[in-house]
Amino acid sequence: LADDFRVRTGIDTQFNTVVFRNRLSQEAKIALYRIAQEALTNIERHSGATQVLVDLRGHRAGATLHISDDGCGVEQAPKGDGHGIGLRNMQERMEQIGGHLRVLSSKSGTVIEARLPLAHMLPPQDKDPQSKAKA
């Protein structure tokens, strides 16, 4: 997603992650992917950003997707005017799986942080199929 975005828009986009000991549930993978899609769409359409950083990390409490840009920030629109639907959709997606979404914005950029609870982390996959047969 980040590579396609960089090629399509010309915006310098970096994706960082570490190998997770645990795996994400399918529901969590879909939620984080859709949030990243919406965030990148908003960056392209509205931010004027020249740099984007997408970072995905697993930790003791679950996992966190962190997307930041150096754009103009998110303007707070009055309720009911149709603006912010994408942000609302991201928030609802996280609430459905017990996660939290935080949006921090200023004139020097925006940070979107999606935090998943540990419940969406699956145990590591056994790399040796013979070890199950031995057990």
Image: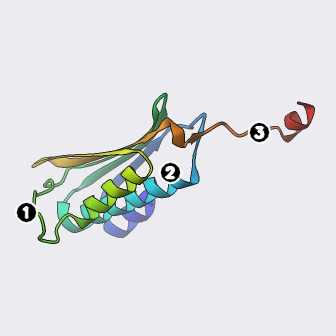
Of pointers 2 and 1, the one earlier in the residue sequence: 2
Give the image's coloring scheme. Answer: rainbow
Residue 34: image quadrant is: bottom left
Disc 1 and disc 3: Cα gap in Å? 52 Å
- Asked whether 11 or 65 is in front, the reply is 65
Q: Residues within 10 Å of mark 1 (few under 14, many from 20)?
A: few
Q: Amino acid at mark 2?
A: Ala
Residue 33: image quadrant is: bottom left
Q: Is residue 99 left or right of residue 123?
A: left
Residue linked to disc 1: 78
Q: Is residue 105 left or right of residue 90?
A: left
Q: Residues within 10 Å of mark 3 (few under 14, many from 20)?
A: few
Discs 1/3, front:
1
Disc 2 and disc 1: Cα gap in Å? 31 Å
Find numbered disc 3 in the image and state the secondary structure of the residue it sits on. Answer: loop
Q: Amino acid at mark 1?
A: Pro
Disc 3 and disc 2: Cα gap in Å? 22 Å
Q: Is residue 92 above or below residue 66?
A: below
Q: Is residue 23 left or right of residue 95?
A: right
- Asked whether 124 or 10 is in front, the reply is 124
Find numbered disc 2 in the image and state the secondary structure of the residue it sits on. Answer: helix
Residue linked to disc 3: 127
Q: Residue 125, image x and y in percent?
A: 71, 40
Residue linked to disc 2: 28
